Amino acid sequence: MNEIEELRLKIDGKLVSINSLESLTSVKAELLGRKGLFANLIDRIKLLSKEEKKIYGQSINALKVYTENRLNEIKIGLEQKQKEMADKASWIDITLPGKAPLVGKIHPITKVISEIIEIFVSLGFSVVEGPEIELDYYNFEALNIPSDHPARDLQDTFYIKEGVVLRTHTSPVEIRVMESQLPPVRIISPGAVYRCDNDISHTPMFHQVEGLMVDKGIRFSDLKGILTIFIHEMFGEDIALRFRPSYFPFTEPSAEVDICCVICGGKGCRVCKDTGWLEILGSGMTNPQVFRNVGYDPEEVTGFAFGLGVERIAMLKYGIDDIRQFYYNDLRFISQF
Amino acid sequence: MKVPLEWLREFVVIDIEPYELADKLTMRGLEIESIEKISPQFKGVVVGRIKQIERVTELDNISLCIIDTGNKDVSVLCGAKNIKKGDKVPIALPGAELPGMPVIEEKTIKGYNSVGMLCSERELGLSDDHSGIFILPDDFTVGKELREEPGLDDIVLDINVTPNRGDCLSIFGIAREVASILNQKAKIPIFELPKDRKGKIEDFISLKVFDLEACPRYVLRMIENVDIVPSPYWMRRRIQRCGMRPINSIVDVTNYVMLELGQPLHAFDYERLKQRRIEVKLAERPITFCTLDGEDRALEKGDLLICDGEGPVAIAGIMGGENSEITNATRIIALESAYFNPLFIRRTARRLGLKSEASLRFEKGIDLENVDFSAQRAIALMHEIAGGVVIDGSLEINDAKKREGIFVSFGKINEVLGTNIDHSTILNALRSIDLHIVREEEKGFVVSVPWFRHDINEYMDIVEEVARIYGYDNIPVTTPRSPVVQFRKNKKNKIVSKVKEFLVSSGFFEVINFAFLSVKDIENFFISDGDERFSYVQILNPISKEYGIMRTFMAPNVIKNIAYNINRGIKNAKLFEIGKVFHPIKNEKLPREDIHLFLALTGKERDYYWKEQYKNFDFFDIKGVVEGIGERFGLNFVFQKTKEPFLEEKYSSDVFLEDVKIGWIGEIKKDVLTLYEIEQKVYGGEVNLMPFIEKAILDFKYRSIPRYPQVVRDFSFFVDESIPASTVIDKIKEMSPLIISVDIFDMFRKEKRSISFRVVFQSFEETLRDETVNEIQEKIIKEITKIDGISLRV
Ligand SMILES: [Zn+2]
């Protein structure tokens, strides 16, 4: 039986030499293949006597099963190892920075205008626009501000030529709209306006949104209603607000709307000049003279108008303290919105 | 308007806290801008009375005063000359603190003991008067701490009076509102003209008003032998707290009465009036006139003047002349109290750029019924503080018309406000601010408006008053009852916001610039005279040259934004701006306003990413964005060679929409960028959005996804540089309607330029057979290679 032991040693030697799936395949062929070791041994068995055949055959067979099992074990081991190697090769450091898509940003002024428009559109207002270079008539006269009116002092106007100015507010759009259609009117009009002023709290160009609602039976209480909805949408349901008498030549009664100071919560601070309130928009019932100027009958219809300062709203909303920031166009500023 | 509460209390009893009052005034439309608390900065100063004054021989100009300080007498050395026995004076006793001075100590000089110090107003921090010791009013109590005397502590409300409320530019006017708030009536000042008057004013002076429209009321009163001295402390204090400067007894009285009652007054030195005449008339021709501030003023025909027998002595309602102003030598005063037409005052004041406290009030309209009352008040006060003898009588021209009553219906008020206020509340509200209800009817009432309210002329003005007094807070909050109004579509607005969305999602940042340019900017872009961008709208009164004209194109401002950001270390930028440009139209008053889009790219997409490297932006990056916008709105732009003077011709092109040039894209010339101190490449593009908006397609129809498969074939040709790739693409597209797209997927240059095209075939009716496609393929090869300069690459 030495011969069988020798064979086993020889086979073990072969098996130990296997270090890859490739060498496994060739060793497997060498041992179990059609021209391999066992094929040879089986050929030799055929030459033996019946007795010998039986004993020898059994031993060879056991050896073959042993070989097959060992080969199988080695194969599983090798496959396992290979899988581990592959895993290692495809490893990534998940803490490396990802590749964020490059998206731009809308200027905060546009952003605030869009928000305002959205709110008023949902209340049934249509968006219209008017020229930025405007006739004195539309910017002043038709709005009840004749050339000798003290209210002209409130607005430092850029002049273009006789009777032509850079509009100082979006209100002339009201006149243009009413001249072009009969009541009812329900419009808002965003856009740039200009005043001859340049310091920490004024820029020569800024933005307003004008609103106008005219129909039979529009009341001051409706003005309060619509603007309350707007302010709650814009600054949150919980914000306190108040309507305060004021003066605009083209509205009467006129009201300034204040919201509770968003900086100090109403306790009083530098921003609200210790009043606890911040002025947010001007409004009022359309002055009957304005209706007469556009050919509406003030006995027939009433209406209200309002004007919002976009920069002011943006400053309060985002806590910006210098209006000029909007116009430096510093990407470190714009990218925050 | 600054309102010291100490003064206001003379007319109305204020029984609420100042902050509460401020809040109530604000809610009445008299917005409080600030509340200033005034309290003396000194400590340990008491009211003393001079019992004795002795010259000290050893010391020059120094007296030794014995002062009664209530519980004991003290001796004080003093150098002032304005004191006399019996005067009440402030004495800072040892240990007293005066603003900006070391603590007061007892001193001995040449053997004389000085227990404390007598103080001037400046030393007490009350004013800048240091001309002598502060002589205290007689009613102050000897021995009392000076700071406890009434009037030293005060609260000054600074009220933002709207231009319609000229009547609130006086303490009395404010008192009227306060009284209405507190359910009181404001008390009119009580005074009497002195009994011992002299002569008749007619014997001293004559008065003529030539233009009653410009000056419907004019009153002259006189007083003689006045002393031009500083006015008493209480008067100076009130004038100062209202923000004006005390001058002398006469001028101070005119200012005091103006502040108190709202009537501007002017005092002439009677003896300097030529021919003893006052004539109110419009200037007939331009003249130069020297006002009392020493400035020469150019007056024009139509300016309202006060003249004496020889010429102007004042610009009516604005400023008096140097030639008749009060001096220390003045003895006789001719006092003017008048109502000047606001339009005349305003026109002249505005043209001269000259505003005074008087013109401010005249141009808003003062109380026509208060003119003579104020003159009498002033004469009485002058007599009180400057002595002298009042000349009897007055000269007066009065052409005041009666104002028409206004009928207002109760229903209308409640209808407009959305309220249900009862009739008596309405009437009481109006009465509380001194409006007179002439007649009350079932449905409404007639109200007569006094002359101090120039802002009330029709029923809506009354509605406003009712709302104001009733309280805006008490008006309900409702939603309009009117049905929804026909919605106006706004394609322009919609497209602009969609273009912005597209650009932001493509990585662009929006900028907004002032719509101004300077002429220099146009020149910097080498734009020539004839170019439309050189015809601009000019601003007559610009902030600066840099903002001198309205922009005619967008490029310069955004290029400046790029420079600004590069200077701050941001070297990669993708910017866009959508805004208006302005072009004058011949024979039209208003210019054309077009909306332009400007795009700018500089640097690269990213500086780095650890996995890969980035190339600098180039022409195709900007072109791709513009193509993308076109595609988004179903439009096809055509790109052609450009001649824009500010572009690198090789790397730029004009943009056409249906044969009309609507803009350009490309590399900005180095020479231009250098002018804006930019050293890196910038690609820009400017497109007029007006034709784009007009043609843009917003409503796409869904096209069903084809049921039959596509067939893709690739072609490679050598294409000579002289033949644009787009020509080949267009040619291929023409070959068959089955071709749905032609793209370029590769291009390289060796000896010749090779371009590879990918052509997609699609039928919507059947599955394409190979033979069909092969046939077209043959045709493409045959036709394209026929073009001179193109051959098939095998
Ligand atoms: Zn605050």
Image (cartoon, coloured by chain):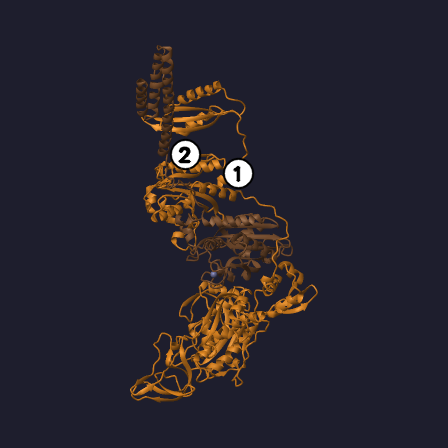
Chain colours: A brown, B orange
Disc 2 and disc 1: Cα gap in Å? 26 Å
Left-right relation of B389 to A1: right
- Give the labeled residue for mark 2: B640
Q: Which residue is labeled 1 in the image? A: B698
Of residue B233 and residue B526, the one placed in the foreground of this image is B233
Q: Nearer the viewer, residue B624 or A160?
A: B624
Which is in the foreground here, disc 2 or disc 1?
1
Give the number of marks: 2
**Residue that protrudes farthest toward the front in the picture:** A51
In the picture, the quarter occupied by the C terminus of chain B is top left
Whether A201 is drawn above or below B735: the answer is below
Tell me the element at label 1: loop
Residue B116, horizontal then vertical, whole percent: 36, 83
Depth order, front residue of B37/B29: B37
Q: Are marks 2 and 1 in contact (CB under 8 Å)?
A: no
Asked whether B622 or B302 is in front, the reply is B622
Please indicate, yes or no, whether residue A34 appears anywhere in the rendered image.
no
Q: Which image quadrant for residue A64? A: top left
Badge 2 or badge 1: first in the primary sequence: 2
Question: How far across and how far down the image is residue A313, in percent?
Answer: 49, 54
User: How far across and down, in percent of the image, does residue A330 sit?
Assistant: 39, 49
Q: Is residue B38 above or below residue B794?
A: below
Residue B450 position in % (x across, y down)? 59, 69
Residue B4 appears anywhere in the view: yes
Label ID, residue A318 = none
Q: Secondary structure under badge 2? A: strand
Q: What subunit carries mark 1?
A: B
Mark 1 and ligand 1: say if the CB distance to the nearest ligand atom is below 8 Å. Answer: no
Query: Which residue type does callout 2 highlight?
Result: Gln
Amino acid type, residue under disc 1 in the picture: Leu
